[in-house]
Amino acid sequence: MKIIRLLILLLFFSSCNDKKTNEGLKTVQKADDNTIEVAHKTDLEVYDFDGFQKFLQKKDNKVYVINFWATWCAPCVKELPYFEKLNEEYKNKNVEVLLVSLDFPHLYDSKLKPFIRDKKIKSKVVALNDVDANTWIPKVDENWSGSIPATVIYKNDTNKFFEQSFTYESLETEVKQFLN
């Protein structure tokens, strides 16, 4: 029994290890069996809520679509292509999409960055790392239960909050209301 507890503790601590990885490098095998490392950097800005709050308060006549998501959230992952499509189709119409990852910090290098790279996400992605969710969640929206996916759409002082999944059509409909 003690051995099992010890193994569980070792697994727990090893999974929480904040190890540095070569995430910014991609190993490529050349024809002559020599390997080289080619830079393929996935930058990730990480904020606590105080640093992140600036993204919720811009007043520059642009429409901001801020989606809270995580790689472990199936409905979040399912709707990400809709945010990507919106970002692509509306980038020249004064609309900016921001994807806010709520993934666990110890998984940034092993899960989040590879996910961003593998899915070829072009929208800006930031990570929100603030353990005091009971304080910052109501600052995003007082009615937010904390469930994800969740989205804020705003322009200047007008905003709408959605604690739901979107289809592309429903997302586009909401954004168009801010463009009129």
Image (spheres, rainbow, N blue to C red):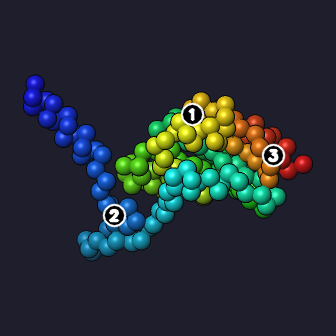
Amino acid type of disc 3? Thr
Say if residue 77 shows up in the picture: no
Amino acid type of disc 2? Asn
| Farthest-out residue, front | 135
Could you say whether the residue bearing mark 2 is in a helix, strand or loop? Answer: loop
Which residue in the protein does label 3 denote? 158
Q: Give the camera-side residue of 158 and 3.
A: 158
Residue 22: image tag: 2
Tag 3 or tag 2, which sits nearer the N-term?
2
Could you say whether the residue bearing mark 1 is in a helix, strand or loop? Answer: loop
Could you say whether the residue bearing mark 3 is in a helix, strand or loop? Answer: strand
Q: Nearer the observer, disc 2 or disc 3?
A: 3
In the image, taking residue 79 as reference, residue 110 lies left or right, namely left
How many tags in the picture? 3
Q: Give the Cα distance between marks 1 and 3.
A: 21 Å
**Which residue appears at 75% of the width and 36% of the height?**
170
**Mark 3, other Cα within 10 Å: few <14 / some 14–19 / many ≥20:** few
- Residue 44: x percent and y percent? 49, 59
| Quadrant in which the N terminus is drawn | top left
Quarter of the view holding residue 143: top right
Amino acid type of disc 1? Gly
Query: Is 81 drawn above or below residue 138 in the view shown?
Result: below
Residue 146: image tag: 1
